Amino acid sequence: MPHDDFPAGSVWLVGAGPGDPDLLTRKAARLIVAADIVFYDALVGPGILDLIDPHAERISVGKRSGRHSRDQRTIDALIVAAALKGKRVVRLKGGDPAIFGRTAEEVTACRAAGISVRICPGITAASAAVASAGTSLTLRGVARRLTLVTAHAQAGATLDLDWQGLAANDSTLAIYMGRAAAATVARQLVAAGRSPDTPVLVVVNASLPNERIIRGRLSSLAFLVEAISAQDPAMLIVGEAVEPDPSFACAPSSRTCDAMIAS
Ligand code: SAH
């Protein structure tokens, strides 16, 4: 059935999911195939970019830790300019566009220019990470809250989070962009009252062939992330919900199961 939700001169912000092309939604795949131009982030993998029409333009606007990237205003302007030329524009983002994805800025820029803009959700990295580890983000009666938090601080700034709020025992923390600040996160959470024995799960390259799953305790978090390269995306999950089942050996989907480290 033909779709009429992607007219010329309009924009879709599309969630590409965590990396595995099979974790794209059908709608995301359809929009990518139909696009005249695709602006994509560094975390969108090759298997997904392969869906782009060979005649369409593909433009990397990637942001990656420590590397130069186009600033947000430039990206907004590029999207708007392409739509004003009458192109079907896909802005492809890792995970879900609504989670640490600068979606608000891009939607605002499009609306200000009178351009139709819509959002196609995607599977966020936190969901992919716990799925790979065979566990859950919530746990009935134990982990009643889920907090999605970024531990990325502006260059030169200290990480200023509500540590008391984050230290609540009944909450699972899904920490995005947390590798560099892992030692600070662990120290501050423990100082705010979270037990050093709280289980942690670190998933690097979740859903991709080079995925790694690392388990430990809050007290060992800094050590657990030490060997992770700045180029590899990593999710840190903290909370009782990710306590490994005693029978846990190695999650079936993980290619390597590096460590089960007790503090
Ligand atoms: N919108 C994205 C998050 C963008 S912020 C989403 O919903 O997933 C980028 C951060 O997401 C990375 O630094 C990392 O912490 C996390 N991330 C994204 N993809 C990941 C993956 N495949 N594996 C582990 N973490 C990932």
Image (cartoon, grey):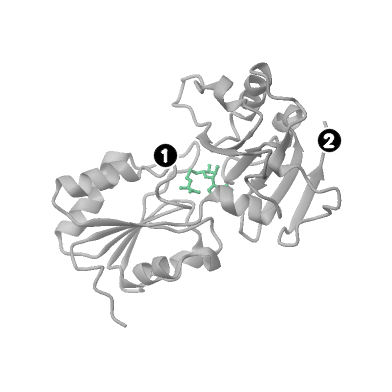
Residue 259 vertical position relative to residue 45 in the rendered view, above or below: above
Q: Residue furthest top?
A: 191
In this rendering, would 245 be left or right of 72?
right
Residue 194 percent location from the top left of the image = 68, 24
Residue that carries the numbered disc 1 in the rendered image:
68
Q: Residue furthest front?
A: 141
Residue drawn at (44%, 65%) of the image: 49
Which mark is nearer the camera, 2 or 1? 2
Mark 2 CB near ligand 1 (8 Å cut): no
Other-residue count near label 2 (Cα within 10 Å), few / some / many at <14 / 14–19 / ≥20? few
Residue 94 percent location from the top left of the image = 46, 52
Residue type at tag 1: His
Name the residue nearer the viewer: 53 or 18: 18
SS class, disc 1: loop
Asked if the residues shown at circle 2 and circle 1 are in contact, with their CB atoms under 8 angstroms apart, the answer is no
Q: Quadrant of the rendered structure where residue 91 is?
A: bottom left
Other-residue count near label 1 (Cα within 10 Å), few / some / many at <14 / 14–19 / ≥20? few
Residue that carries the numbered disc 2 in the rendered image:
262
In this rendering, would 78 be left or right of 241?
left
